[in-house]
Amino acid sequence: GAGVSQSPRYKVAKRGQDVALRCDPISGHVSLFWYQQALGQGPEFLTYFQNEAQLDKSGLPSDRFFAERPEGSVSTLKIQRTQQEDSAVYLCASSLNKNTEAFFGQGTRLTVV
Amino acid sequence: QQQVKQSPQSLIVQKGGIPIINCAYENTAFDYFPWYQQFPGKGPALLIAIRPDVSEKKEGRFTISFNKSAKQFSLHIMDSQPGDSATYFCAASSSGGYNKLIFGAGTRLAVHP
């Protein structure tokens, strides 16, 4: 596609529910990032993939957060047993390789009620 | 040492004015400093970026000034327009690894007609 596509755009989850957020990066982009953006704040790094390898997951806030990119293209961020503090916009970004410009998707706004 | 501090939090200017947004960093390993523009409901989009080998970079109405010794950089928007009203984020990363961006907290800019 022309850009990074994320789905769903909006997700409302009841506390304790599991959610899965999808990211379709730009075709051919090797690097993929997930960021979390709390209301009124800058994005914060969650995790990084180079192709299918998850090379950095240092930003994942707890073991309830899990990300995968099994075939080196589409990525899924999964949050288990959602909590209210997980409410945020989750942004996906991709880049052609590890040190080129990162292009962001529109994000998924997760609200945990 | 990973923080990027951004100011001001919000800024209001009249059309044609020159808003200036400032950022400071601590980590001397940072060598890539991009600025992102974000409209409500959209993902951040790269505006302009600079590396420490130059002190200034211009692209259209946007200019980055960089002071390596002070570990500070700033964004100037010349002849600002109402369409420039958005949230602006500075960021920093180190090319030694991959493009893991550390973002400032953002500046909400309003340009009044």
Image: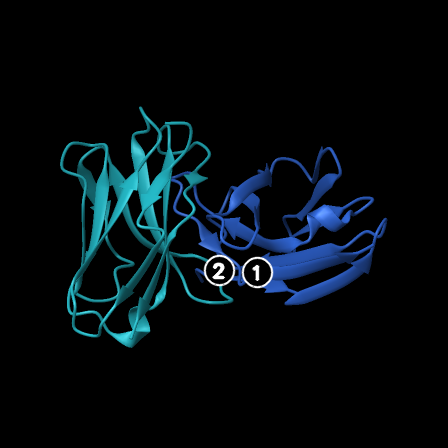
Q: In percent of the image, x 18 and y 40: which residue is there?
A: A69
A11 vs B44, nearest the viewer: A11
Question: For residue A49, what is the image quadrant?
Answer: top left
In the rendered image, residue A59, in percent from the top left (x then y), is placed at 29, 59
Q: By what rule are the colours in the image chosen?
A: by chain
| Element on which disc 1 rests | loop
Query: Looking at the image, which is closer to me, A20 or A41?
Result: A20
Residue type at numbered disc 2: Gly
Residue holding disc 2: A42
Which residue is rendered at x = 79% and y = 47% of the image?
Answer: B80
Q: Residue A22: where, in percent of width, then height?
A: 25, 46
Give the quadrant of residue A71: top left
- The disc label shown at residue A44, or none: none
Left or right: residue A65 versus residue B53 is: left
The residue depicted at 84 percent of the width and 52 percent of the height is: B17
Provide the residue designation for mark 1: B106
Is B98 situated above or below A56?
above
Question: What x and y, as percent, mark residue A10?
Answer: 35, 57
Q: Chain of mark 2?
A: A
Q: How far across and how far down the image is residue A81, in percent? A: 15, 69
Q: Colour of chain A?
A: cyan
The correct choice, above or below, for A60 with respect to B75 in the image is: below
Query: Within 10 angstroms of label 2, few (less than 14), some, or many (20 or more) residues?
Result: many
For the residues beneath circles 2 and 1, the answer to whether they share a chain is no
Contact between marks 2 and 1 (CB within 8 A): the answer is yes
What hue does chain B carry in this figure? blue
